[in-house]
Amino acid sequence: MAKTYPLKMNLNGKEVQVEVSASATLADVLREQLGLTGTKIGCEEGECGACTVLIDGQAVNSCIYPAMKAAGRRVLTIEGLAKNGELHPVQRAFIEHGAVQCGYCTPGMVLSAVALLGQNPHPTEDEIRRALAGNLCRCTGYIQIIEAIRDVAGRSQG
Amino acid sequence: MICEEYILASTVEEALAALASLRGEGRLIAGGTDLVLQLQRGERSVRCLVDITRIPGINEIKLEDSYIIIGAATTFAQIERSTLIRQRAPVLAEAASWVGSPQIRNVGTLAGNVVNAQPAADGSIALLTLDAEAEIANLTGRQWVPVASLFVSPGVSRVDASAEMITAFRFRAHGPRESSAFERQARRKALSLPLINVGVRVLLNAEGTHVRDVRICIGPVAPVPFRAQQAEAALRNHAIDEDAITEAVEAAVLESKPRSSLLRAGKEYRRELIRVLTRRALLRAIEAARG
């Protein structure tokens, strides 16, 4: 049996402590222990980006990220984006642009976009494409996703 | 992921002591972007993972005298963004920008790339191009060794991650009339292993007309990251002209031994890529060195 350890982290703005297995990935803890199933499991090998969460503002694949690495970090999942019932601008733009088809890649896509805009509020289209290179959409609705992010970037400019 | 214990080490000494007490059943983890997959697939088994990424200073990039020193757990994202590396060792910044995806670069580390010992590892090819050294720490002390000496065979490095660790890399920052470049071709522009990658570094004479010294490193064309020494010899102390560049490029094609891979590319196509990418990297490095 793997040992367990108390893991403290700031999750979606709240300090939480959870007892985790040495063997757990962050995706395991978020989904199975904390019930935050907005973080999706796709390929389970860091290729598809469905499990993307932000650690201290940077996108990581939570399915290959040992849970213990999150100790003391700020973790943001898709559940933490809306504030007071208001969707995040990136979430709103995805809806307005029809950037959601089956929806499975959407949480990861949105979080990769939020990470990009946090570091670079006015990205070029190339920079947007590069920031999304680790997120696959099997419905292949990439154009609407890129348009949604361009829209948010343009808005914050004006 | 499969392990029974997980330790966040706070010093190099603590990490090494933990490994010693585990007697071969422990293994260091940095980013884990390769290791976690190997554990999940059952390709490796360990009792305890010893995480080195919280050791103070282990993810810093600094310039000391004329050397750039990069902590072992520095991520590819940090390297890609570092102004110092972009200006004084562009081959490494460019190589880092090709690794995996943003998610992988935010976590994956330079030392992990080297210890995984893949013959086309972008980080390893760039470090070889820079004549980099690695500082290896074990219970007997610390010593600097050439990165080129660390590769044994595909997936096997000379660093025993169950007993010792790389703490840092160092190499000379480019001086005047010196520059470098990295070229790579893959099936897609992310999350794709290179069909061929090439690192080139050149040092020119003051007039920018002759090559004083040159490194040309290529992957995957041998069991370990490969230095094309015959190609280098064709250029060293030669005037820069079309003939010299063609001679070097053809020497690189001849001395490389690429293999056919059903998933990636045939050896014939890879040879053509060596020809094209080595030329591009040389021309770009020479242009940058002329300033």
Image (cartoon, rainbow, N blue to C red):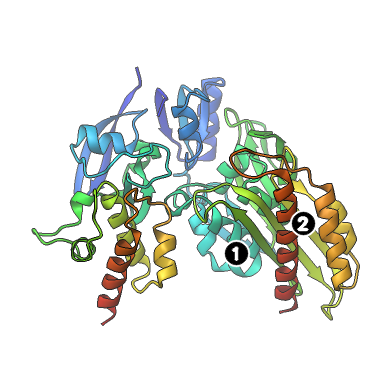
Residue B85 as seen in the image, left or right of residue B206 = left
Q: Position of residue B44 (x, y in %)?
A: 52, 25
- Seen from the viewer's position, the closer of residues A51 and B169 is A51
The quadrant of the rendering that contains the N terminus of chain B is: top left
Q: Which residue is mark 2?
A: B216
Residue A86 numbered mark, or none: none
Q: Amino acid at mark 2?
A: Ile
Q: Position of residue B173 (x, y in %)?
A: 69, 64
Other residues around mark 2 within 10 Å, as few (<14) / some (14–19) / many (≥20): many
Q: Residue B216 occupies which quadrant of the picture?
A: bottom right
Q: Secondary structure at mark 1?
A: helix
Q: Residue at left 74%, top 45%?
A: B148
Dot 1 falls on which chain?
B
Other residues around mark 1 within 10 Å, as few (<14) / some (14–19) / many (≥20): many
Image: B239 above or below B142 = below
Q: Which residue is mark 1?
A: B85
- Seen from the viewer's position, the closer of residues A77 and B234 is B234
Asked whether the viewer can see residue B145, the reply is: no
The quadrant of the rendering that contains the C terminus of chain B is: bottom right
Q: Residue B8 occupies which quadrant of the picture?
A: top left
* C-beta proximity under 8 Å, tags 2 and 1: no
Image: A74 above or below B200 = above
Q: Position of residue A61 (x, y in %)?
A: 38, 45
Asked whether the viewer can see residue A86, the reply is: yes
Q: Position of residue A39 (x, y in %)?
A: 26, 44
Q: Amino acid at mark 1?
A: Ile
Mark 2 vs mark 1, CA separation in Å? 19 Å
Dot 2 falls on which chain?
B
Residue A154 as seen in the image, left or right of residue B231 = left
